[in-house]
Image (cartoon, rainbow, N blue to C red):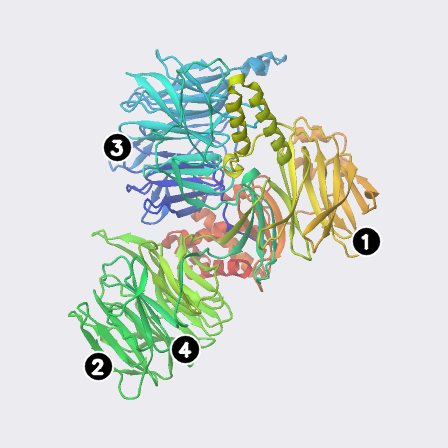
Amino acid sequence: MFLYNLTLQRATGISFAIHGNFSGTKQQEIVVSRGKILELLRPDPNTGKVHTLLTVEVFGVIRSLMAFRLTGGTKDYIVVGSDSGRIVILEYQPSKNMFEKIHQETFGKSGCRRIVPGQFLAVDPKGRAVMISAIEKQKLVYILNRDAAARLTISSPLEAHKANTLVYHVVGVDVGFENPMFACLEMDYEEADNDPTGEAAANTQQTLTFYELDLGLNHVVRKYSEPLEEHGNFLITVPGGSDGPSGVLICSENYITYKNFGDQPDIRCPIPRRRNDLDDPERGMIFVCSATHKTKSMFFFLAQTEQGDIFKITLETDEDMVTEIRLKYFDTVPVAAAMCVLKTGFLFVASEFGNHYLYQIAHLGDDDEEPEFSSAMPLEEGDTFFFQPRPLKNLVLVDELDSLSPILFCQIADLANEDTPQLYVACGRGPRSSLRVLRHGLEVSEMAVSELPGNPNAVWTVRRHIEDEFDAYIIVSFVNATLVLSIGETVEEVTDSGFLGTTPTLSCSLLGDDALVQVYPDGIRHIRADKRVNEWKTPGKKTIVKCAVNQRQVVIALTGGELVYFEMDPSGQLNEYTERKEMSADVVCMSLANVPPGEQRSRFLAVGLVDNTVRIISLDPSDCLQPLSMQALPAQPESLCIVEMGGTEKQDELGERGSIGFLYLNIGLQNGVLLRTVLDPVTGDLSDTRTRYLGSRPVKLFRVRMQGQEAVLAMSSRSWLSYSYQSRFHLTPLSYETLEFASGFASEQCPEGIVAISTNTLRILALEKLGAVFNQVAFPLQYTPRKFVIHPESNNLIIIETDHNAYTEATKAQRKQQMAEEMVEAAGEDERELAAEMAAAFLNENLPESIFGAPKAGNGQWASVIRVMNPIQGNTLDLVQLEQNEAAFSVAVCRFSNTGEDWYVLVGVAKDLILNPRSVAGGFVYTYKLVNNGEKLEFLHKTPVEEVPAAIAPFQGRVLIGVGKLLRVYDLGKKKLLRKCENKVRLPPNTNDEVDEDPTGNKALWDRGLLNGASQKAEVIMNYHVGETVLSLQKTTLIPGGSESLVYTTLSGGIGILVPFTSHEDHDFFQHVEMHLRSEHPPLCGRDHLSFRSYYFPVKNVIDGDLCEQFNSMEPNKQKNVSEELDRTPPEVSKKLEDIRTRYAF
């Protein structure tokens, strides 16, 4: 058996985020790493929407990421530390929309190893050097410069190694143009290692060490080192040179400290705590991430605590000495893995779990009533300041990026009866958890819906002038009338537009620079800018049946299949071409391409005839109306659309933006099939046809604009959008009701929208999340979801949610009451009333935990609920709160053979579980009966067991429960579950020693002395390293009529499938594609693809579709070389890639 791996949804969790001007323009961009993916995002400074420009799989683990700019440069480079044993410097090329590898320097073995650099990166703020460090011992410094042609150069590495030293964090210190300096948080473990009593280990202190790169002597010196009082977790560089005092801020438990060498005394300030916090009072507080903002005149830092509170930190200086640190509560946002403050006034928050956010910084928090805390304020050692958290005041949320990370469990089923199954995904952590329902499709935002006086049959938008940015009119055609609406603040009917209102309209368009044309059954109406009207009337009894128009050309088909062609002359007059063309059959549809920039006309006209053919006709003056090519179709065509797609944006000498793409003829058939064919721009030949079934109605096609490029909206029983995104074609359904006719729409509020009609309504829609495979609906949960089961009869979900280090609602209320009473008791006689008011205010205050976080209860504290939910509406039908310190670990829904038709829910619960050192007070299996058609849980009984019941499964009318290392079969009794039989799982006595000697497990797999060296009972059929932690696996069908595939979901929010090959030829073909791509297109960060996919065990019988699909983003000459090796053409290869994807998924 051979499998092919495909990613449907790339990982969505972010591990690193950096910002800079990567495309070399003034625009600020963000580069994020999502484990093994590098992605470039650009927030639109006007709307605040975040667009993805480029996503690349790097087939390696990205361990560190830094933006880097040479002195005096205007463009940022990206430095990547990965598991490849190499440092890689990338540059973003906007013209090709790709990351180009500028440098790749090898320094060690591959893999995430203790002493191979790659874990930490630090950049000299003036852009002269970069340090890459391992967790232990090795650090390397590379000097970066530019050569005569202004290209980036890199030196050979300079070593700054120190044995027996662990590194916690590294930053570049801003020293202006002195010798570059790096600061490290280190710990020397040599003494602790050699001291058997453990005393030295308890006394080992962390040190702050400065390394100086001496540019004159070209080597690195360990300049200065000092022990630290608290254990630091990260460093923040303070601007230096002419911008500030230099030095570093050390963030450690409960304190933030400023240090610099020389006469500078240490300045330390405690981290403020929330007033009346329910957290365990013994628990320390740390900062988890920070962002720096620096302008010519000032700088400040935003640092976030592990509860999500952001503080604005400023330094007060006296000449060059820092005198105090000031902290001020700024706002609270979800806990971030990384934050970036952009020059455009945005704060990007890459959340640790759940969705990511872009905020606008509306105020800098200077002039509000919020108290400012300072290191100069007198405090007892161990005391701290208190502040009151509140809703957002300085930040305004402008965009939210959906993230599924972490996906803890997923089931795929068609519970909503939609033909296509939905993915039910349990994701998130703690109070930010959700159950999300994913459907294949693009999310549609409805901008406006208005009723019309009848059922229209068509709609168009036109501009007044070719230079206009936005549309001026919406024209709606009815059976016997035409309605013209003008677009402004509101949309209202106008009568003076020059359009004929008493007839239906076949098409209308802007003609030339500022004239309009309306084609109606009896003629053509040409409306000049000064409202003069020219009319062309149809001859005799003939009427116009079909037409095609663009900016300079009009083609009409009269009854009987006669074509009449008009072209606009330089004076703006429409002239009829002398001859007319008789077609061999009636015309059913026509299409013209847009006029290419700088040309007079579009060369081709596509005509669909009743005889199931499409013909391409030339409009070139030399052979006007001559047929060029023809294609026979399997059914009658319904509509045609010629678009230019897949182009990369090119800027010509004048700075005009145009795109050079390919011409595609899209053909919608009456049987619901869409064909896409390549149209040769010189000869007009048709080749390379791709087919997709869209739905049960005839397919209508409309040209729209998406992200500056042409795209096609195809309407059948569902609407689909065909567009090119990141050098790949996407054909995605819209998650919206059936539409009948549409046109592109541009206004100030909605620059790239669609205006569409559905029965008697006019709708303005926007598609913002291009490139997204799924659209999602999220229903919030209370704790982290661990697992859920589907009740087969009602389709309801039974979800168990469990959190460690958490309080149940009851305990929380009890704790609050207790604290309120203490507040009143602690107050003196005269302050009683005030204290009582404060206590009442404290009890009434309810900050949403999804933003402010849940209180941390301490180790060994658990909270759990069992929830019954309707997955369609998302409403909770029943909620069972378990006692404090009862943790639900497993759930099953089953029938017992001795109780007939009733359904039971069994939940395995652990009591007083402590994770480290592990201990447990036993467990229970709660049994509930499902009543009210599966909407309520009725408690029957609980069965005590001696260990954690970690797995429950129905088994032959009874139930199978894994209790610790025992496997048991239980049956349902009156007072508890009855044990029927059990089986112990035993390991041989010397297992521990064997595991110590053989950490990889390879030896254990092959030469075991067990059972006289008997061979393995299970044979390994396939092995494949996904690169992310897989938490659910299911065999299912994703598209109606498709074949079965294995769907897996990962902790980082990725969804992928493994599909079987149906023929040897296919397998052989893809094996060769993979082989050629490994050599021609090696991974971006220097990891070897084969060894990445064989991280722990050699890859076996799986072909990596993610690598094969990078064929589409290779340079054309490389594509040609690879496809020639395979005896194919590049379109044939990409068609094979597309086919295997659409056969199983999307």
How many C-alpha atoms fall within 10 Å of the one at disc 3: few (<14), some, or many (≥20)? few
| Mark 2 lies on residue | 578
Query: Badge 2: few (under 14), some or many (20 or more) residues near its Cα, within 10 Å?
Result: few
Residue 847: x percent and y percent?
51, 35
Instruction: Tell me the distance, in whole angstroms, between the alpha carbons under discs 4 and 1.
Output: 65 Å
Sequence order check, earlier mark of 4 and 3: 3
Say whether residue 829 is left or right of residue 483. right
Number of numbered discs on residues: 4
Q: Is residue 317 left or right of residue 1006?
A: left
Q: Is mark 1 in CB contact (under 8 Å) with mark 3?
A: no
From the viewer's perspective, tell me whether residue 1131 is left or right of residue 804.
left
Front residue (pair 1096, 1057) = 1057
Mark 1, residue position: 899
- In three-dimensional space, the C-alpha distance between marks 2 and 3, rounded to whole angstroms, equals 64 Å
Find numbered disc 4 in the image and state the secondary structure of the residue it sits on.
strand
Would you call the spot at circle 1 few (<14 residues within 10 Å), some (14-19), or many (20 or more)? few
Residue 955 to residue 1037: above or below: above
Image coords of residue 488 (percent x, y): 29, 59
Q: Which mark is residue 613?
A: 4
| Mark 4, other Cα within 10 Å: few <14 / some 14–19 / many ≥20 | some
Point out the tag, 2 or 3, that comes first from the N-terminus.
3
**SS for callout 1:** loop
- Rendered view: 444 above or below 623: above
Residues under numbered marks 2 and 3 in contact, where contact means CB atoms less than 8 Å apart: no
Residue 337 location (% of width, % of height):
47, 35
Q: Secondary structure at mark 2?
A: loop
Q: CA distance from mark 2 to mark 1?
A: 88 Å
For marks 1 and 3, the one nearer the N-term is 3
Kindly identify the amino acid type of the residue bearing the numbered disc 3.
Answer: Gly
Tell me the kind of residue under disc 4.
Answer: Thr
Q: Which mark is residue 72?
A: 3
